[in-house]
Image: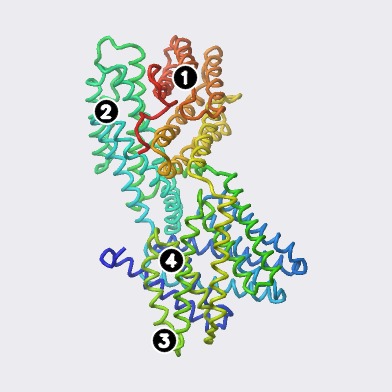
Amino acid sequence: MNAFSLTGGDWLFAFKTAGAALLALFVAFRWNLPQPYWALLTVLIVAQPYTGMVRSKALYRFVGTFIGASMAVFLVPRLVNMPQFLTLALAGWIALCLYLSLIDGTPRSYAFILAGYTVALIGFPSVTSPQNIFPTAVARVEEVCLGILSTFVINELFFPRSAVPLYDSRIRRWLEQFLGATMKILQEPPGSGSLESIRHRLSIDLAALDPLSVFAAYDTARSDHIGGMNRLRELIRELLPLLTEIVRHLEVLDRDYPGTMPALRPLLEECRSWMEQTVHHAPLPLPVLLKSPEMAVPDLPESADRLIRSLKTCLISLCNLWEDCHDLRRDLRGNAAIPGSLKPLKPPSSHRDHLLAGLSAIAVFITVVLIADFWIWTEWPDGAIATMMAAVVGSFFAAMDDPVPAIVRFLSFMTTGSVLGILTLFILLPMAHNFLDLSLVLSLVLIPAGLFLGKPEYAIPVLSFSIGFAGVLALSRSYSGHFAHSVNTAIAQNTGIFLMAIMTRLLRSVGADWSVRRLYRSDLSDLALLARPSPAPSTDTANGEGEAALGRIIDRTPQLAIRLQALTPEERRLYSQSFLHPSIGRILLDVSRLQHSLPGPDREHLVRFLEGLSDVFRKHPLPGQMSFRALRKGIRSLEDALSSGHDPLHRNILERLTALETFIPPEDRNVSPLSATGGSAG
């Protein structure tokens, strides 16, 4: 980032952040709080460019700090005479909060993290003076609340920026990219290359909309708009699986029935034109060719005819979904009332890796206990600082597969902040004789920090730099520069972080390939759940379980997309089939909903097929290790059994089974199961 790339919004955010930090510091001095620098540091932690982000983060930080401070007050006086048990209790609380934050997986998880390491920030320094635990906890809560309040007031009073336009612009950009890929696919079918080139990025960008929608919700007081934003996000989640299904149909038609492609082109072109026009115009009637019952192709086999009908059904679903997305977005942008029929959807089910969360919690627990025991055994004066920094850093990066590189980077920026803090403390601060002088000195750091803090890619480096800088500076009402104490503080901070990096490498770090395999197996487990026939007619509970399983599969897709970049080309090719799992899940969910309406003998045929398919998925075969002979034979048997029925129910089930078969590779090719077309991961 250079000065020429900075916008007016960047400079505004930098000055607002510096102003809020100085306001918090000034009030902390006037109130004679024991550690005013915590109010300043809280501003840098809470500050965000948009009001919704500030409100969300401020709320969760306050809740987490209050809970953590209360737990420290509860534990320390009761166990201070038993230091080993106190260490175990504090470390256990930190590990529990970290585990809960990783399992929660929403912006709310920030409160769990704060509740954990606030215990470390208050509890460990109070071990040597337990009689002061309550005043220390109260002071820490006051300092944090002061920083939160200063940030909130400055942000609300001076040029507040709503996160709603940002959310809308991200939605618009995502839809434009999706439309561009769809246009290429429909113009040059089957379009496998166009889909592979964009689905990776679209999957990752889609995941970024989840927290952004939460922040945008804090910027509107209208419950119907909050529900509308959530529903829009859920509708958009269905677009990629549906487009993938269309591409698979086109691939099979182009490979097995090339004579149908010329007849399909007018249909595809009409859909293409309709989707493009819908972006800029009011709702339009569906393309006429989609409503026509037959295709003008002579001597069309029954299997090809069924495949075309299934394709048309997918195209109709895509057009309807595309129209719903744009209608809802127009209502939100125009501040119109969201129709009462558009109730918010159920919160999407998300993938949670309990094993990885447990490993992260165990690594932090063991590291905190070891450092605390070393501190107690050696009577290290600054051991509390090392212990609490290990807890903080271990919590910050626990969601990563391999946190060590990020921890080392954090350590490097924190060391830089500590060095600059020492230079400021002994060179510049002695020249500051009043608060105005102090403000000018701190502005030399706060304004540049604010410029970078507004950029997500720089947020953690700026935060680590600020912790090192503020921790060494340790501002109070009177100047107290002790060089040895400042150096020892910096050494203790860095030692705690360094030991956390070592223990994380030994106990917790995993490779991207390990995570990809776990995510892939989790996908297969949910596909097995979707394929498993429910014993009773369809109920809300059964539908809810299926929708939850499909939601988890969709949620894993961006996680896989991110990690695929770290794999070898061959591994990327094999595991890129994970992009197809949401589409397969949609088909299985549809079949599951339809099966109970079939008459007895036909339903028994379908149940046997689904049970066999569920057993195959439950065995978690790796890519390239699944046999398709039984699966293909089962579909043929079902087609024979169900083809005698000419009612819409039988036709719908046959079409969904035909759609499922498009994800099975041809028998004469040695390719991966239910795999992509052999391209890269995109």
Q: Nearer the viewer, mark 2 or mark 1?
A: 1
SS at mark 4 in the image? helix
Amino acid residing under circle 2: Pro
Q: How crowded is the residue under tag 1: few (<14 C-alpha within 10 Å), some, or many (20+)?
A: some
As drawn, the label of residue 437 is 3
Above or below, 44 relative to 263: below
Q: Nearer the viewer, mark 3 or mark 1?
A: 1
SS at mark 1 in the image? loop
- The residue singled out by tag 1 in the image is 628
Q: Position of residue 413 (x, y in %)?
A: 45, 66
Q: Are marks 4 and 3 in contact (CB under 8 Å)?
A: no
Q: Earlier in the sequence, mark 3 or mark 2?
A: 2
C-alpha span from label 3 to label 2: 68 Å
Q: Earlier in the sequence, mark 3 or mark 1?
A: 3
SS at mark 3 in the image? helix
Residue 277 in sight from this viewpoint: yes
Q: Earlier in the sequence, mark 2 or mark 1?
A: 2
Amino acid residing under circle 3: Asp
Q: Position of residue 139 (x, y in %)?
A: 60, 75
* Residue drawn at point x = 45 percent, y = 90 percent: 433
